[in-house]
Structures are given as C-alpha cells and as structure tokens.
Amino acid sequence: MPGNTWLVVGLGNPGPGYANHRHNVGQMVVDELAARIGATFKKHKTPAQVAEGFLRPGGPKLVLAKSNSYMNTSGGPVSALLKFYSLPLERLIVVHDELDIPFDTVKLKSGGGHGGHNGLRDIAKAADSPDYVRVRVGVGRPPGRQDPADFVLQGFSSTERAVLPNLLSDAADAVELVITDGLLAAQQKVHAPSA
C-alpha cells in the first residue's frame, strides 16, 4: 500500500466537549480534507477514527486520522496507524495547533523540537524520531498572563471564528501541496508573503 499513500493526522482531544477548542484545530483541518475528498470518518482497528480517499482520481491516497486518545498520548495511535498501513515516517503529516505562530498563519516544517507541544513530543517518542512533516496552524499567544494550557483549551473568539474557515482551508491546501509538490516547494508557496 505505501506506493502513493499518505497518513495525515489531525491532533486534538476526543469528544464533543473539546471539538471547538484551539487545541483541536488539527482535527478541524482533517475534517476539511475529508470533506474535500468526500470521505467519512469511521471507527478503525487502531485507536483512531479514519477517513480514506484519493486527492484526485488516480492521485495520491489519503488516510486521514483523528486519535481516540488525548493530545498528550497521540504517539501510540499514530505509531499504530503507521504500522497498520505499512507506511514509513516520511509519509506522515501531522497537523497541529501552534502557539508560537500568529493566528491565521500556517507554517510547514519537518523534524526539529516539539516546542513544548506534548502531542508532538509523544509522537516523536513513539516513532523513535522527530523526522515527520508538521503543518503548524497558528493560534497565537494567550493574552496577558493567561496560562497557555488554559488558552488552547478554549474556543476561538468571535473575531477569530469569522476567519477560521479561511485558516482551515489554507492549512488543508498546505497539506495537499506537501503531498503533490514536496515539502520544499510547499514551504516556498505557503511561507511566501501575501501580495
């Protein structure tokens, strides 16, 4: 199956109580991708919800996944999915919230540190390597002295919610670009300043 198959994991916490939190923006992006390819999330043999489909007819296959476990224990489900689909780490794209990037901004990187993000830390530990592609969706820093952990477990403000569909679309576009054009070309397009 590895031929042209990609595992795209949207990080977040399970259950409706967390669905609209900043921490779940990764899952919102894979929902957007599932809608684009006409796929529906279903229970899977691994501890995850999975939706499968093709980017375009005859094109790359996408395995979109949302873990059934909490953010901080994302590693086990991601590792299980890679094994189930016999995919190497180079075919993994993780979509996650990023405090160190302004809201409404998307950045791409491969490897490197976890920047205090416990979901990324757990995936790197379970995979025995940090060398996977990350689509970093900016949620901005908390205002004032608010604890970042509290900030990411809140919903977006009304102003942010108005822009959120565009942000999710931009992040989904970034995932598609990584798959079709490669990371370097995708970074050049995604990181280019807006005209």
Image (cartoon, rainbow, N blue to C red):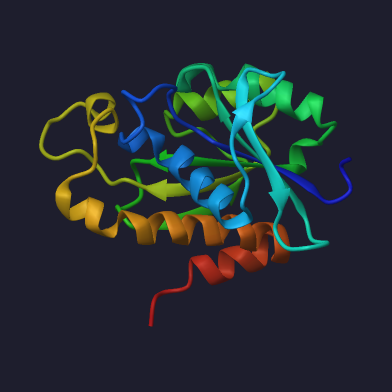
Q: Tell me which corner region of the image, top left, top right, bottom left or bottom right, holds residue 100.
A: top left
Left or right of 18, for residue 176: right
Q: Residue furthest bottom?
A: 195
**Residue 128 in view, yes or no:** no
> Where residue 149 sits: x, y (%)?
28, 25
Give the residue displayed 63% in from the left and 17% down from the top.
47
Left or right of 180, for residue 93: left
Give the residue displayed 44% in from the left and 22% down from the top.
14
> Where residue 176 sits: x, y (%)?
63, 59
**Residue 185 in view, yes or no:** yes
Left or right of 137, for residue 135: right
Left or right of 92, for residue 30: left
Give the residue displayed 10% in from the left and 37% down from the top.
144
> Where residue 120 sits: x, y (%)?
53, 30
70, above or below 185, in the image: above
Of residues 195 and 111, the one drawn nearer to the viewer in this rendering: 195
